[in-house]
Amino acid sequence: MVKFTYKTASVPEELKKALKLIEEDFPIGEAHKPLGIEVAFTLSGGGPGFKYNNGKAAVSGSTICQVLRALASLRGFAIQGNIPAEFSEDSQFQTLGLMLDVSRNSVFTVDTVKFLLRRMALMGMNTLMLYTEDTYEVPGQPFIGYMRGRYTQAELKKLDDYADALGIEMFPCIQALGHMGQALRWPAFDGLRDTSDILLAEEPKTYQLLRQMIEAACAPYRSKRIHIGMDEAHGLGEGTYRKLHGQVPRFDIMNKHLAKVVEITDDLGLHPMIWSDMYFRLGSKTNDYYDKEAVIPPDVAKKIPPQAQLIYWDYYHFDENFYLDWIDRHRAMGCEPIFAGGLWTWTVFWLNFARTKVCTDAAMSACKKRGVKEAITTAWGDDGNEVDMLSMLPGLQYFAEHGYNRIVSDEVLGRNFLGNLGDSIDDWNLGTLLDDTPGTLTIGEYHKMYGVELAECVDSDAKWVVSNPSKYLLWEDPLLGLFDEDVKNIPFAEHYKKLSKDLKKALGRVKLGRPHLEFAKALADVMEVKSQLGRDIVRAYKTNDNDALTYICEKQLPKTIRKTEAMLVAHRKLWFSVSKPEGWEVIDTRYGALLARLRSAKIRLSDYLDGRISTISELEEDRLRWSSVLEGILVKELDEGNPQLGKDQKIILPPVGYRHRQIISPSIVV
């Protein structure tokens, strides 16, 4: 192992605490005797960098996190055995940050957030927001975050102190309009609902509550910045508000409400920011944030309080020109936007690194061309945070690399990830193959079909169609398979068998990544037997192959149950190692439902094979395609030599989407 030492007396005062903090999982310590590489630190102008000669390094940067980034880079070079005599980078942004979702069941423990802060500092990132819809303490409002694992003010104060020592600014990210359903469901908030998810605008008690929330959210932090959300308020003014005030233009409701909230932030000396999508949606005939035909009237734009900085969020496009256009549209509204990209952690169990990469490339390239100064990325926990949220680290490292490089190479990314965690990024990214469906078109293949040129920064090998078979095939009912017809020709079992073997090898190499890859392997093991279970049952039943049904009943189903139970254990272990216990009950019930249905399937097959029933009605009905060619789900032919496919067969995939969360059967979504 490469180790680093330093002499405390020569370390700038601002850096001393940061170096002590990273010692927890980074190989550095005070020099009591010559050991490893001796490092001297300097806080000075310029970006992160170092000079190296004969076992000694001079590491520098203009901020604490830039110095730590340079240190991680030095470690990466050292592990690879090729430290250059001199190395330097230039910072591309003033703000390089992360917004972490801790509102959808999983609330990271204080120790896990500290771990993440150390990783971010070693990436050179300087901003962290915890997205807390209701998972923060509001004195006088006990039902906000009730039994949801909310952070106490003491916990958040502790995190702010920790972040500050690492050179990272933390500030709150809450909601002041929509996405308030978790709190508004309680009777304590009767009279404050426009709809089940949206606060009632122009109601005096709403602003009394918002003042309490904003004061409480900001109290633990040094920063005077606050993110007040206000995105995706679908149905604004269409519920109780309409009954009270009649039909009012939603632009007017939005601006009046924002003005009142800004009065509160002004009074408290705060600097607010909001997501910008509602203005674009209200100007779109289809309520689409990215509608190129959307029109925001100039008088509406003028009424947006100038104190409220707009955040342009976009996780989806890999066309750089789209981002350039939308940055220009925000500036045309009279504001300098913050850009927010996305780490693809939603609707999956593991980060979709390939899609994260192509969207980040296009977005950050556009930001640099337009001179955007503040950029963050987001990690959302949709689906109840089933995802291993720390699987985002390769994507987060990739985003951070864009903060210091014009174009990010695989070489630089791999070296700096290695320097940060001591693990190979290739080992971590094996997890993304959980949703790599064999046969889907790549972006390059799709564009070639239509003669469209790709931008220089776009990875043409990334998949065009984003799918999540680890979700829809895991939770799919074994007797009522919604996707049996769609995936009948896809060799998922072979795919997951190979992935499991590769993950087993990687487990022998990784250190910090071990508990995460253990979970990924447990999922791959389940999917090897579960991904084709429904199709096997239908095929055997329809062909009257009782020998095959007996094998499924006595061997395949029990094996699937055992593997699912093992995955439950691995998932539970991972959850409780990184998150508070509240929220796990949601995931627990999903596994419970799946295991119950697997056991019921075994009973149904046993009853049929033993003659207690003459038919299994669930299997009599013909399977329909969830998707169709008309939906435009484009795929390519698999290798003609694959015995599971006919010569000219093509694969039709169900597209990824929120409708594919935890679907058990046509009647049950958990």
Image (cartoon, rainbow, N blue to C red):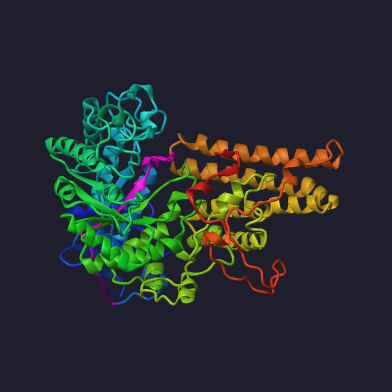
Depth check: give the residue in front, 281 or 137: 281
Q: Give the side of residue 284 with respect to residue 345, left or right.
A: left
Quarter of the image for residue 60 reads: bottom left
**Which image quarter holds the N terminus?**
bottom left
Q: In which quarter of the view is residue 244 placed?
A: top left
Relative to 638, does residue 561 appear above or below in the rendering? above
Q: Residue placed farthest to the right in the image?
A: 611
Give the camera-side residue of 105 and 417: 105
Magenta segment includes 226: no
Question: What residue appears at the point 39 percent right and 33 percent down from the top-left corner?
Answer: 182
Q: Is residue 466 left or right of residue 334?
A: right
Q: Is residue 38 visible?
A: no
Along the line of sight, the residue nearer the viewer: 26 or 45: 45
Range shown magenta: 85-110
Q: Quadrant of the C terminus?
A: top right
* Percent x, y of residue 298: 16, 52
Residue 295 image position (x, y, % from top left): 25, 54
Q: Is residue 95 magenta?
A: yes
Does residue 457 lie above or below 179 as drawn? below
Task: Give the image location of residue 367, x and y in percent.
Answer: 26, 64
| Residue at point 49%, 66% (across, down) | 463
Total labels: the figure holds 0
Q: Position of residue 133 (x, y in %)?
A: 34, 38
Indicate left or right for 415 with 403 as reference: right
Whether residue 129 is visible here, answered yes or no, is yes
Q: Is residue 441 left or right of residue 85?
A: right
The front one of 109 and 642 is 642
